[in-house]
DNA sequence: TTGAATAGTTACCGACCGGTCACACCTATG
DNA sequence: CATAGGTGTGACCGGTCGGTAACTATTCAA
């Protein structure tokens, strides 16, 4: 971690290697991933559980069933690993978007509702909030390389959501996507702050109400107010 | 900081003292506060700037123009100081609510709009989000004493906002207050994550749209959709 | 003036941090 | 079989962390 100064000698090793050797052998036994991949996914998990500043490289290496030296041969610095872990999560989220699109092809409004449902489910399951947002809270040192990763992620999220709203034909797509995005972010930190009550349901109701508000100029609104959810 | 184990010997000194000596002397020179108060407010500020894990007790003591020994005579442990700093912020926020109420007496709807405006302003001014929420993100060790402080704070906030919505006579006060609360929380972390763009305006528009959605059963809605904000 | 609190100073402790070194190990390929 | 490249091991470095001890300086009230 760059405590006060920036990392002076991060080599940022990102060589392309065989990645994972023997994805599964003849016995059907799932062979372990390559050390690098183990380290990234383990780091991801431990960062989520303990916070980025709350876990040390040694502990990450050990949990990934490898050692600090190997970790540093792949990443050069903890900050490097942080960025890679954030990118990892970021890509998983991108995959979620693709899958969402595929689940309701050519029906953006259904995709929108599906998005709400999926996020609510994620909210109910995931004890810790959004890894990227949490990282933004933790890493306040300006100029930290993770900031770029986080910004890119949030921008991409915002763009996809906005496109979805626009395709769904709501009256003010930009305003709705902003609203939904803030609601999601807010629900996540709410869950962290107000110990574990049920913000998942609240989130869903709020989202559905917001969507209903913008569905069609006049009539959809009345029904939004009349009925719960 | 309780690294892995819990604090074993936090004395939690909270004796009642004269607090601040000589609030101002004859020359009009503002005499400094008592060390304890200096430490709390300084800690508050430094926690906000660098994160709770990102600043050490030594640095706090020095910035408060005192020393570590005095700090420990007052607080017993860093965790104690953290709680006290969070309580400090919490009380300042409570004062903001009282002041909000006083600014538009007997006009809850005006108070609601004033709340939105004030939060948007705070969003524009304050580079770092909500201290309490950020603390919740940073302090993941379960059983940390700060959690109780944070929960109490969030609960109180939620209650006041809900009461305000109810008094304002909107159609679904609970849903609106949940929405507004999530929007605020979300706007704050959004500002942290997506580098400094203008979520203040977005927040305000989203809030106003949400309020308009619930203003009165039927007609207020149409105007919400028709006009921008 | 005396005495008790409170505040400041310096040094120190053990633990842990991120990061590096030298060296032995293993395994795939030539 | 030899070699090379990724991997594992353990010791080590300088620095910082939270927290304590012992002692001195200041303040203020009786």
Image (cartoon, coloured by chain):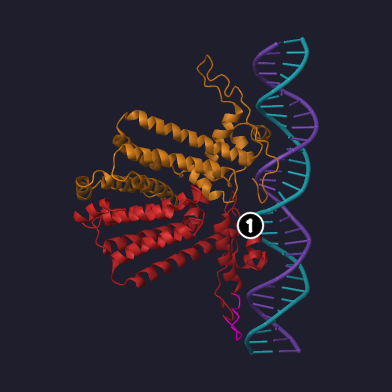
Chain colours: A red, B orange, C cyan, D purple
> Is the residue marked by circle 1 packed among few (<14), some (14-19), or many (20+) residues within 10 Å?
some
Of residues B4 and A74, which is closer to you in this image? B4
Is residue B229 within the magenta segment? no
Secondary-structure class at tag 1: loop
In depth, the one of A46 and A196 nearer the eye is A196
Residue in view at x 61 percent, y 56 percent:
A55
Q: Position of residue B91 (x, y in %)?
A: 49, 33
Quadrant holding the N terminus of chain B: top right
Q: Please give the name of the residue rendered at 45% of the width and 58% of the height, measured from the top-left corner.
A: A123
Look at the image and tell me whether residue B117 can be seen: no
Q: Residue furthest front?
A: A227
Measured along the vertical axis of the image, is residue B101 above or below residue C19? above
Left or right: where A102 falls relative to B192: left
| First to last magenta residue range | A24-32
Q: What is the chain letter for disc 1?
A: A
Residue A148, horizontal then vertical, whole percent: 46, 58
């Amino acid at each position: 971690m760059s405590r006060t100064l920036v990392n002076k000698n991060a080599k940022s090793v990102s060589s392309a290697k065989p990645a994972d050797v023997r994805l599964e052998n003849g016995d059907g036994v799932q062979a372990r991933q390559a050390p690098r991949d183990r380290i990234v996914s383990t780091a991801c998990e431990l960062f989520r559980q303990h916070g980025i500043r709350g876990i040390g490289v040694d502990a990450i290496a050990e949990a990934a069933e490898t050692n600090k030296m190997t970790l540093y041969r792949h990443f050069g610095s903890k900050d490097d690993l942080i960025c890679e872990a954030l990118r990892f999560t970021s890509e998983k989220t991108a995959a979620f978007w693709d899958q969402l699109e595929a689940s309701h092809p050519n029906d953006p409004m259904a995709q929108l509702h599906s998005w709400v449902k999926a996020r609510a489910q994620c909210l109910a399951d995931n004890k810790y909030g959004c890894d990227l947002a949490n990282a933004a809270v933790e890493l306040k040192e300006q100029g930290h390389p993770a900031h770029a990763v986080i910004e890119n992620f949030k921008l991409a999220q915002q763009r996809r959501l906005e496109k979805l709203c626009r395709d769904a034909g709501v009256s003010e797509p930009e305003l709705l996507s902003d609203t939904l995005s803030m609601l999601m972010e807010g629900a996540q930190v709410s869950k962290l702050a107000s110990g574990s009550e049920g913000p998942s349901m609240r989130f869903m109701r709020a989202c559905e109400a917001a969507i209903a508000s913008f569905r069609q100029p006049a009539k959809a609104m009345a029904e939004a107010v009349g009925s719960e959810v």
